[in-house]
Image: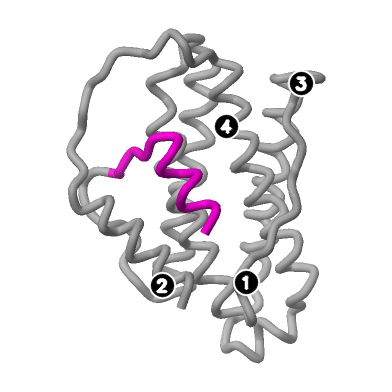
Amino acid sequence: MLSQYLVGGFLALGASAIPVHTKRDAAITDTDVLQYALTLEHLENTFYKQALGKFDDAAFKSAGFEPIVRERFVEISQHEQDHVTFLSAAIGSQATQACEYNFPYNDVKSFAALSMVLEGVGTSAYLGAAKFLGDETLLTTAGSILTTEARQASWVSSSVLQDAPWSGPFETPLDFNQVFTLACK
């Protein structure tokens, strides 16, 4: 139920999205954006580690999934860990740490549905934050992470949930407040 609410809210935001060009806010630094991204990557990293620790191959099979589905989620989990490692190193000693999280899934199918929501929010978060990055190397790296998140979202949506792999010709950028609001639900 909660994941359906999050998906619905996320899709509603996407329905009204149009590309907008805005100037970079000088008050937001590259480090602020990296900390923001790291916060989200910690959430995703913990989400996958907890779920994959809870749901083994037999649980995925019992839910009707082929073994490749869990294997791909393991790969996604590794991607999220790599993102945490990269962002933590880029920030240095002031890097934010993971929090304690409570994820509302009961079984493999609700885990997969929530995975789609988190990957979608992650994609839109990177897209919305990109305009604040002044360093071109960081912007390119953030773009690389964004495209990985988008492919992960597309795979979960189409291959796992048997739904549409995308919602339209444009992705919805979300601002910092929108992302934190969705992530905290």
Element type where label 2 sits in the image:
helix
The residue under label 4 is: 36
Q: Position of residue 84 (x, y in %)?
A: 70, 37
Residue for badge 2: 4
Near mark 4 (Cα within 10 A), the count class, few <14, some 14-19 or many ≥20, is some
Q: Residues within 10 Å of mark 3 (few under 14, many from 20)?
A: few
**What span is colored magenta in the figure?**
171-185
Front: mark 4 or 1:
4
Q: Amino acid at mark 4?
A: Tyr
Left of 158 or right of it: where is 77? Answer: right
Q: Give the CA separation, mark 2 to mark 4.
A: 25 Å
Find residue 97 and report its image quarter: top right
| Mark 4 / mark 1, whichever is N-terminal | 4
Type of the residue with mark 1? Ile
Mark 1, residue position: 68
Of residues 18 and 99, the one nearer the viewer is: 99
N-terminal of the pair, mark 1 or mark 2, is: 2
Q: Look at the numbered discs 1 and 2 and tell me whether their residues touch, using CB distance below 8 Å.
A: no
Residue pictured at 42% horizontal, 63% vertical = 6
Q: Which residue is mark 3?
A: 94
Quarter of the image for residue 164 reads bottom left
- Which amino acid lies under the numbered mark 3 shown in the image of this protein? Gln
* Mark nearer the N terminus (2 vs 3): 2
Q: How far across and how far down the image is residue 163, in percent?
A: 35, 72
At 40% from the left and 43% from the top, the residue drawn is 178
Which residue occupies the foreground of this view, 120 or 185?
185
Please name the residue shown 63% across and 42% down the image. Answer: 41
